[in-house]
Amino acid sequence: MNRTILFDSPFLLGFDHTRSLIERAAKAASEGYPPYNVEECGEGRLRITLAVAGFAADQLSVSLEDNQLVVTGRGDKDRTAADRAFLHRGIAARNFVRSFVLADGMDVEGASMEHGLLHIDVLRPEPARLVREIPIRTGA
């Protein structure tokens, strides 16, 4: 694994986790299916919308683990392409796993499906400002 020069700075201490987040995000960005939108829906709110035409709600799952939002789609095994004769097949119905890396503190409020679109609402709360004085001890 190549180390990014940026994280080798002696002024950036404890950022190993950040490097792994960036690597996970780069891997997720290389996935092309299904297409998706990310929109800002007001202060601290985001909506991720995935185009999941051909999938029913019970064929989709949304999970959150270690700040990684994972959306999985499993097609209907009973109605495979081998069972049907397509003259043209332009609607992809393949299985997929799409993941998004969320920042610390972000939370998934819920998911809904409408007109072949899966909407996932994410809340980004305003971080609390914390200022702390550090006492200076002396040798005496």
Image (tube, grey):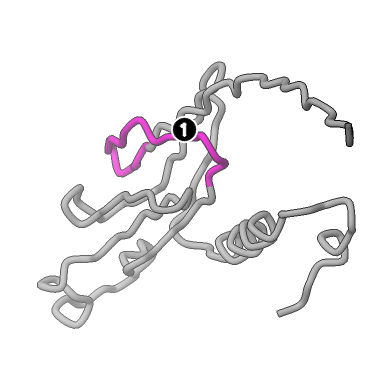
Nearest the camera: 111 or 88? 111
The stretch in magenta equals 102-119
Q: Residues within 10 Å of mark 1 (few under 14, many from 20)?
A: many
For the view shown, which residue lies furthest in the front direction?
140
Q: Measuring from the top left, give residue 42's x and y in whole percent.
A: 54, 17
Q: Is residue 103 magenta?
A: yes
Identify the amino acid type marked 1: Arg
Position of residue 95 relative to residue 14, above or below, is below
Q: Measuring from the top left, give residue 130's x and y in whole percent.
A: 67, 21
Nearest the camera: 37 or 99? 99
Q: Horizontally, is 18 left or right of 117 in the view?
A: right
Q: Measuring from the top left, give residue 4's x and y in whole percent.
A: 81, 67
Picture residue at 81% right of the left edge, 60% below the top: 7
Magenta stretch secondary structure, dominant: strand
Picture residue at 59% right of the left edge, 66% below the top: 27
Q: Horizontally, is 77 left or right of 131 in the view?
A: left
Q: Measuring from the top left, give residue 107's x and y in whole percent.
A: 43, 34
Picture residue at 85% right of the left edge, 64% below the top: 8
Q: Horizontally, is 133 left or right of 50 in the view?
A: right
Image quadrant occupied by the C terminus? top right
Image quadrant occupied by the N terminus? bottom right
For the view shown, which residue lies furthest in the left direction?
78
Which secondary structure lies at badge 1?
strand
Nearest the camera: 130 or 95? 130
Q: Is residue 54 magenta?
A: no
The residue that disc 1 covers is 47
Position of residue 21 relative to residue 102, above or below, is below
Position of residue 31 relative to residue 117, above or below, is below
Which quadrant of the structure image shows residue 78? bottom left
